[in-house]
Amino acid sequence: MEFDKVTVCGGGILGSQIAWQAALCGFNVTIYDIDDEKIERCRGFHQHYAKLFKTDKPFLNLNYTTNLKDAVSNASVVIESITENMDSKKKFYEQLSNYVSDSTIIATNSSTITPNKLKSYVKKPERFLALHFANPVWEANIAEIMGHDTTDKNIFEKTVEFAQRIEMIPIKIYKEQKGYVLNAMLIPWLASAQHLYFTDVADYRDIDRAWIISTKSKIGPFGIMDIIGLRTIYNIILMDAKKTGKKELFERAEKVKKNFLDKGKLGLSTKEGFYKYPNPEYETFLDKHNV
């Protein structure tokens, strides 16, 4: 199968990276988002990536639009990377189904919603599956591929091929699993760190310091939350709160909203979350003199 046109729907942190990576690998890429402000934010991300990679070449392959019909016209692959909210995704797929071709592979980059929960809203659900990327895409270069119970096996293998062609290492998942492989391990770890901080057991710096020093990692849980984006973290916490009814989770979500989202501290994308960027404090935690 020729992947002549790739469309990424949602130009946020991960969506912009997926689009850049595909364009860097020579694919014709269209980024769709809902308004001009979000499109300009995506352009800003790409300008930053151009400095990081020291090349403007991907811009030759990148197109931007707020028109969904134009965005997905003749697309070989459509990758959805919109906000992690079930109602938003349902609305998006219902709109997408009005315009997308019967021959298009449709993939969700959702980190918490399995494809089985979305397939009824998708045109040609047998061509629908999950294609999940880690952040940052070019360093954590895995692509987790997970179908649902009626995903065409050939589509699964074609998606594996596509992942390889954009220089990702495909992680094949043969059974639906919330969180795939990576987040099935990562989310409980982040939740443990959140519990320690939001119940006043320890300061977030010391929680990260404990992890970084003990494991010799470059980054701890709160640095990772900044990279993921605190709006996504908020949505995940709120979704779990509604699912479980736990008071602690509702309180945690409210604290994230009040202390971060309402103040515009969304993480790396706004240059401030738990840490300030571009030189976050945790980069010094392996220095034994830094206490």
Image (cartoon, rainbow, N blue to C red):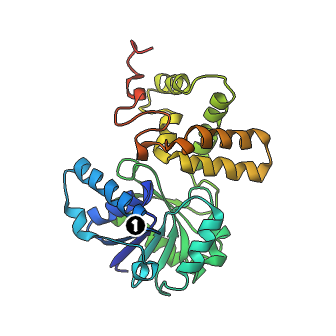
Indicate whether 70 appears above or below 179: below
Residue 15 position, x and y percent, is: 43, 60
> Please, what is the three-letter code of the amino acid marked with disc 1?
Asp
224 with respect to 58 (left or right): right
184 with respect to 99 (left or right): right
Query: Which residue is found at the position 56% from the left and 44% from the top?
Result: 262
Indicate whether 167 appears above or below 232: below
Residue 244 position, x and y percent, is: 78, 49
Residue 65 position, x and y percent, is: 37, 73
Q: Please state the total of marks drawn on the protein image.
A: 1
> Which image quarter is the N terminus in?
bottom left
Q: Secondary structure at mark 1?
A: helix
Indicate whether 30 appears above or below 268: below
Query: Which residue is found at the position 50% from the left and 87% from the top?
Result: 102
Report which residue position mark 1 lands on: 36
201 with respect to 11 (left or right): right
Q: Residue furthest top?
A: 289
Query: Which residue is found at the position 42% from the left and 73% from the top?
Result: 66
Residue 266 position, x and y percent, is: 49, 45
- Depth check, front residue: 147 or 263: 263
> Which image quarter is the C terminus in?
top left
Locate residue 289: give its quadrant: top left
Q: Residues within 10 Å of mark 1 (few under 14, many from 20)?
A: few
- Depth check, front residue: 177 or 225: 225
- Depth check, front residue: 210 or 225: 225
Query: Which residue is found at the position 32% from the left and 79% from the top?
Result: 4
